Amino acid sequence: MSLTSYSKLIECSQEIDVGMPVWPGNLDFSRCIFRNYEEHGYFTENYSMPAGTGTHIDSPGHMIKGGRLIHSLTLEELICPGVVIDVTSKCDENPDYELSIEDLEAHELIHGRIPKGALVCMKTGWGRKFKDPKAYININPNESHPICSLGAMHFPGFSNTLARFLCEQREISGIGIDTLSLDKGLATSFDVHITILGNDKYQIENMYLEDTPPSGFTFISMPLRVKDAAEMSTRVMAIVN
């Protein structure tokens, strides 16, 4: 596909800003003015943030010792066919919903088989909540949880059964989601992470998928190419043919 022949460009990443949602216990994003116009004649800042801030990509090395890291991901993987499976209505009814093989089959019945090398994304509607960290993270402090000391988080994610199926039967490049994690908030282990990254794929979290079509487009993800980084914030866009 020629990058000059597209009909539409769609933003699929969230803005990085002070006060944005972060994984509970992680450092917040912060910024500090280093030089200003009045004193120095130009403007520059220093930023402090975890590598996995905002819309970000996890390399296999995020969970798998010896796995590939961000600088090793290829352009062919990062520029790939896009698929978005919309289960917003199900997630509105059940914040702990897991994307299933049945959801995939229903999607393929309408839009065709998932293309080889695709980035397959779960659209939950959570991206609309991103500017409200409390609603986005959705912690119940009255529920104990082994992963989050602040309480149990409630947001949707992939089922591990589907994650395994996508790796073994659809030869994907990776998966993505518009929530804080590919594993649902109530998950007590990172099974989906381990399945995807253990199969040498990548994954993207905190996406914005409200305007993205279900199929027939190309995803482009451009993380900073920091050597030996396991995670990195990324700008993601969809190019509609």
Image: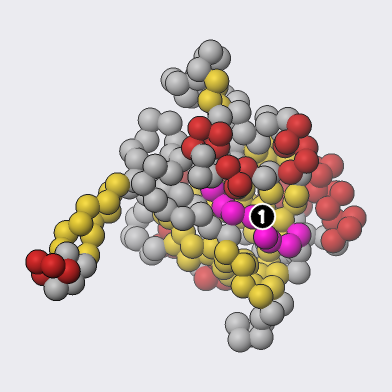
Q: Is residue 54 magenta?
A: no
Considering depth in this image, is 14 or 5 the residue closer to the camera? 14
Question: Residue at the front extreme?
Answer: 38
Q: Is residue 2 visible?
A: yes
Question: Residue at the right extreme?
Answer: 109
As drawn, is 198 to the left or to the right of 39? right
Q: What x and y, as percent, mark residue 171?
A: 70, 58
The residue beneath circle 1 is: 210
In the image, the segment drawn in magenta is 206-214
Q: What x and y, as percent, mark residue 7?
A: 69, 79
Residue at 89% across, 58% down: 110
For numbered disc 1, what is the local secondary structure?
loop
Q: Amino acid at mark 1?
A: Glu
Considering depth in this image, is 239 or 193 the residue closer to the camera? 239
State whether the magenta stretch is mostly helix, strand or loop. loop
Please tell me whether residue 115 is drawn above or below residue 61 in the rendered image.
below
Residue at 58% across, 60% down: 12
Please tell me whether residue 112 is drawn above or below residue 127 in the rendered image.
below
